[in-house]
Amino acid sequence: MKTFHCNRCSQFVFFENVLCERCNALLGYVPELSEISAFEDAGDGQWRSLHPRAGGALYRQCHNYEVEKVCNWMIPAGSEDTLCAACQLTQTIPNLSEQDNRLYWFRLENAKRRLLYTLASLGLEVESRQSDPDHGLAFEFLEDGGDGERVMTGHDNGLITLNIAEADDAHRERVRSAMGEPYRTLLGHFRHESGHYFFDRLIDGGKWVKPFRKLFGDERADYGEALDAYYQSGPPADWSNAYISAYATMHPWEDWSETWAHYLLIVDALDTAASYGLALLPDDPDEPTLTDATPVEDASFDNLIRRWFPLTNVLNSLNRSVGVADGYPFTLATAVIDKLRFVHRVIVASAVKDTAPPKKAVLSRTPRTAAAPGKS
């Protein structure tokens, strides 16, 4: 995630901000520019962008920005849409009459927008249900039913279901600890499930299938049997020699999605470091340095990995200095790096320039509790 600044007063602002704390300018994300813009009131619900690349264009706030307060994306004033490109992808929202659900919805949308930003920066096209009713990308944010019915976070033909309990920090930490996971975040869920979506889009039935199977295994293996075996016996003892996580050992689909999610983590963190101008220049010549700021979308895989190790070294060292767990609790074995390299190759080959924002989807306000079947 790159850095942003208010176009009125140059104050440093963040991707999620809605108001400049210095000059009180309205802030909003303009997906056509991939920029946070400051705006001035133009009347009649319209806002004039102050971003130099916008040319004074007029915009409106997304309905979920203006009314629901869970978004900060803008829509061109001439558009017939009431929801922004990101909110259009949310098919079902939580029941807002329930306590804390609006907060969970806000957190889910924030994580989803960060995912969409990364995908767009990599040139990965996202199709909505409007353009592809059967397989386009859509999201459902559901909660467990009062009758004990459980919602499983998962993916099925482009439909990503997330249990809103994952937006509860205390719940997510309990699950992370119980499952013995070193890393479990809301954004990580979105990255992982998007991996399933892009497997169907980029790998399944195409030219990448054979090299995929060589690295990840045969995805035609029965998923249900693999799932049962994993939860009965757990991962092999030496799983870290070939997998990014224990869960990745469960099935080739999960190995791919865990690796995909990790690649997105790497490029997002490196993009942030480069945007801040972060450089590592230790006094000891034997310690790793970091001076390269090549944009991640232009970098080779070797360039990314060469920069990644010193960045994670300092990240973990900083975390330990303030007394918290390592920010990067992973070890990248050679086999894992080979898989990450494959993800990079697929993304680079599949990237398109000037990707259009997703087309309109339907927003449902009816709370649901049914779990989405398919790959999790």
Image (spheres, rainbow, N blue to C red):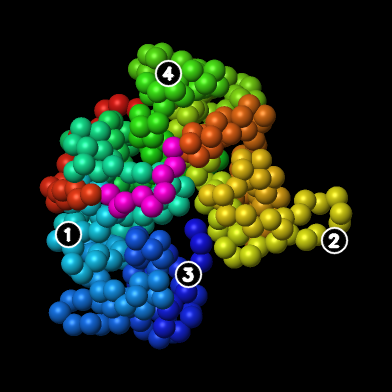
Report helix, strand or loop for mark 4.
Answer: loop
- For the record, the magenta segment spans 350-358
> What whole-number distance in Å separates the C-alpha atoms at marks 3 and 4?
41 Å
- Answer whether residue 100 is visible to the viewer in this image: no
Instruction: Kindly indicate the quadrant of the structure image that contains residue 192.
Output: top left
358 over 179 or under it: above or below: below
Report which residue position mark 3 lands on.
4
Q: Amino acid at mark 2?
A: Asp
* Quarter of the picture holding the C terminus: top left
Q: Earlier in the sequence, mark 1 or mark 3?
A: 3
Q: Earlier in the sequence, mark 2 or mark 3?
A: 3
Instruction: Check if residue 351 falls in the magenta segment.
Output: yes
Q: Residue at x 63, y 26 (%)?
A: 335
Q: Nearer the viewer, residue 323 or 333?
A: 333
Instruction: Check if residue 252 falls in the magenta segment.
Output: no
- Answer whether residue 12 is visible to the viewer in this image: yes
